[in-house]
Image (cartoon, grey):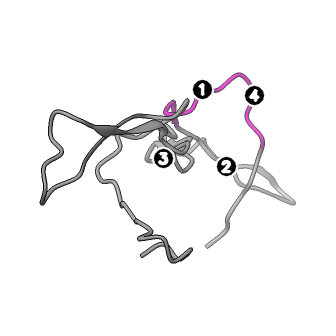
Amino acid sequence: MVVLTATPYLLVFGDSVFAKIIATNYYGDSLESDAGNGARVLLVPSAPINLVKNKVTTTAFVIGFSWEDGASTGGSDIIDYKISYDQSTGEFV
């Protein structure tokens, strides 16, 4: 297997990228391959912003939070959030 890393320009995160390959040897070029499976330009998402306690959902037993997604989803839908908390120990669990 051969892996080619390139720097495509003018792509937006989430864009699909397809490729075709031509093999070349001493005698010349092969026919062009079929288009390969599309890759997607993806990154991890930006950190959520504006985290605040949600007064409407906070009770004596439940603390509700509200936040907004960061600037970028990385090109893919966010499917989960992980929340850690600190009970004045300086350690988030």
Please state the extent of the stretch shown in magenta in the rendering: 7-17
Q: In the image, is residue 52 above or below residue 89? A: above
Q: Dividing the picture into quarters, in which one does residue 12 lie?
A: top right
Give the mark toward the camera: 3 or 1: 1
Label 1: which residue?
12
Q: In the image, is residue 64 above or below residue 1? A: above
The answer to which of marks 3 and 1 sits earlier in the sequence is 1
Residue in the image at 12% along x and 60% along y: 61
Query: Which numbered disc covers residue 36?
Result: 3
Label 4: which residue?
9
Name the element at disc 2: loop
* Quadrant of the drawing holding the N terminus: bottom right
Labelled pair 1, 2 in contact (Cβ < 8 Å) = no
Q: What amino acid is labelled 4 in the image?
A: Tyr
In the foreground, 70 or 49: 49
Label 2: which residue?
30
In the foreground, 32 or 77: 77
Crowd around label 2: few <14 · some 14–19 · many ≥20 (10 Å): few
Q: Position of residue 72 (x, y in %)?
A: 53, 33
The answer to which of marks 3 and 2 sits earlier in the sequence is 2
Horizontal arrangement in the rendering, residue 56 relative to residue 27 (left or right): left
Name the element at disc 1: loop
The answer to which of marks 2 and 4 sits earlier in the sequence is 4
